[in-house]
Amino acid sequence: MTIPKRRSIRHIVLLAALLGALAAAGPGGLSWAKDDPKLRQAIEAANGQFIAATARGDAAALAALYTDEGQVLPPGGEPQTGREALKIFWQGALASGMKQAKLETVELTEAGDLAFEIGRFRLYGADGKLMESGKDLVVWKRERGVWKIHRDIWNDSPPPIGN
């Protein structure tokens, strides 16, 4: 028997979570809505708060954008769960020189109190130089009536060929 690679395990866990959400929704299932303008406005406003907190260098404000049990799944790193761990994680990112973030929502799908965002990001240093760019998948959760980041996973995009 072969042991699944770590990435495969994450895919299995995500699929199990999605199937669990569908089962919990009952016989009627979840109602899926793609690119609802009201949801897009709420998510883009939250992303705007992320951008502003990054510009201020405010790790506590970044952590506050996540659910109580929010989690980042950074490339090459261990998952970080909960507000205190997220604050420490973002303090490290800010200390590495991250001063500006640009976020783009490519696709957005809502399913009850969950929303799934596919996006692109660019992170810049104080000198305006691009530090990192890539794509991300964010699972948003409505917590006490507010859309918050619940799961946040991303990876780098390779530089264009010839650069």
Image: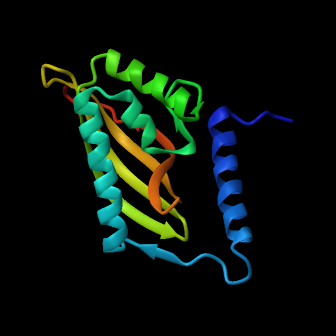
Residue depicted at x 69% and y 40%? 9
Asked whether residue 76 appears in the rendered view, the answer is yes
Q: Is residue 31 above or below residue 46?
A: below
Give 158 or 96, whichever is nearer the viewer. 96
Q: Is residue 64 above or below residue 140?
A: above
Quadrant that contains the N terminus = top right
Q: Is residue 14 above or below residue 162?
A: below
What x and y, as percent, mark residue 102? 23, 41
Q: Is residue 63 above or below residue 118?
A: above
Query: Residue 49 vs residue 139: left or right?
Result: left
Give 27 or 46, whichever is nearer the viewer. 46
Place residue 34 in its image quadrant: bottom left
What x and y, as percent, mark residue 43? 35, 58
Colour convention: rainbow
Asked whether residue 105 appears in the rendered view, the answer is no
Quadrant that contains the C terminus = top left
What x and y, as percent, mark residue 21? 67, 64
What x and y, as percent, mark residue 93? 37, 22
Q: Residue furthest bottom?
A: 28
Q: Residue furthest left?
A: 127
Q: Residue furthest right?
A: 1
